[in-house]
Amino acid sequence: MLMRRFHSSMAVSSSLSVSIFKVLPWRSMRPSKVFITTTTTTTITLHTPNPRCNNTALSFCSNSTEPADLCPQHSSKQSPLIPGLYLVGTPIGNLEDITLRALRVLRSADVILSEDTRHSGKLLQHYNIKTPLLSYHKFNESQREQAVLKRLQQGEIVAQISDAGTPGISDPGMELVKLCVDENIPVIPIPGPSAFVAALSASGLATDKFTFVGFLPKHAGSRKERLIVSAKEVATQIFYVPPHKLHQFIEEASSIFGDCRQCVIAREMTKIHEEKFTMLLVIYPANLGCIYEFWRGTLEEAKGAFLTRQPKGEITFLIEGKANCVVEAPSESQLENELRELISGGQCLSSGHLLASFPLCVSFHTNMKEIDVAVKLVAGGHSMRRKEIYSLALRKFGKLVDKEN
């Protein structure tokens, strides 16, 4: 073997001289190893022809004469994970979005709580993670909580993941976190992708103030109340909407926010669900690993665009804040319909033709308290005087008030 001095462009972080020698086979010019001799810990940047290691910072221990790879290595040692509950964010469509820290936690955990073990199994298989999975979803979390809590109390490392995004954010996890906090068990968030943050950042709507609502309640009256609250806020409103309920959501939102409000319908989808929208749509290339689609327009335009179309994939629905939209004063019939739906507790919302036959839908035990609540919500949603709405409510529905109340 012949020892030849290896002249390379390098940056040395200390003032010490560093000698680098390249070990070559007698009849070959191909480098095989590098010996580095220093008297202290030194960080060196080597500029070599190797495409895997170009401009890579390497760290070496003091007085080291051991061969060193030219591949990147971390300069600081990773401390072992402490026992506790780790909430691990996972990709929302592109497996490359997972973080190195998330992978380390998933590999180090004693068990992984998964919303859907079949779905999560694909992620773990892709990264060759062998940690056992335990199903943990909204239908069994109350049965699993105590068993999981016991494992945590025994000092285990428990990781929790959802199908996509962050556990506890419109996904199971909130109740388990509460239990851990009450029992003084560490809860460690491992940040990752978020569908609503991704959609908001590229929506074109205001990002300085926003309200994340998530999924609306199933009960029509409760949905109405939440939408009325959102309609009067100046911040951008963000909702998660199941694809099969998109048309219903647009109809209800339009009647409360007003047709002129700008909205963005964002959808992340895999190639399996690929389809093309034709109106005001931006489609990013499929070679990014997943497709983000953004439909932009007013709520009125959205009603027409999605009247007969049911898109696939998860949907994030964004509506601009009130300050950015001039809303026309609602008609008396619109106010009457809103009052009717609230007073009836939403019983008539599912059947539009029943709205005209209000007495058939509303219990005759309606009292003034229910009317007062409805008046407050409607007046707040339209920034109107409560006295004006109250007068309308008495005129239209006063006969339905239970005399005993």
Image (cartoon, rainbow, N blue to C red):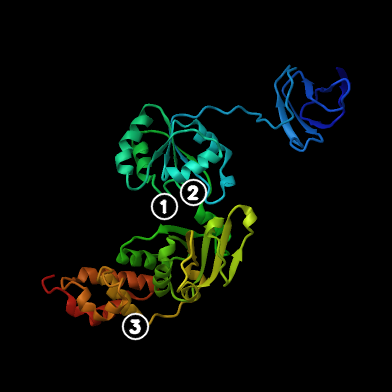
Residue 96: % across, % down: 59, 45
- Left or right: 168 with respect to 343? right
Q: Quadrant of the N terminus?
A: top right
First in sequence: mark 2 or mark 3?
A: 2
Mark 1 and mark 3: span between their CA atoms? 36 Å
Which amino acid, mark 1?
Answer: Ser
Q: Quadrant of residue 271?
A: bottom right
Nearest to the observer: residue 381 or residue 334: 334
Evaluate whether residue 120 shows in this view: yes
The structure residue drawn at horizontal position 52% and vertical position 62%, both measured from the top left corner, is 266
Q: Are marks 2 and 3 in contact (CB under 8 Å)?
A: no
**N-terminal-most mark, 1 or 3:** 1
Per the rendering, the mark at residue 332 is: 3
Count the marks: 3
Q: Nearer the viewer, mark 1 or mark 3?
A: 1
Structural distance between the alpha carbons of marks 2 and 3 = 43 Å
Q: Which residue is mark 2?
A: 165
Residue sitting at x 23%, y 69% = 370
Q: Quadrant of residue 371?
A: bottom left
Say whether residue 232 is visible. Answer: no
* Residue 50 pos. (x, y %): 78, 35
**Residue visible at 33% across and 31% down?**
150
Tell me the quarter of the image containing the C terminus.
bottom left
From the image, tell me which residue sits under label 1: 170
Q: Secondary structure at mark 2?
A: loop
Query: What amino acid is labelled 2 in the image?
Result: Gly
Q: Residues within 10 Å of mark 2 (few under 14, many from 20)?
A: many
User: Residue 191 at what x, y percent from top left?
Assistant: 52, 43
Q: Pinpoint residue 320: horizontal percent, then vertical percent.
A: 50, 67
Amino acid on which disc 3 is placed: Glu
Secondary element at image label 1 = loop
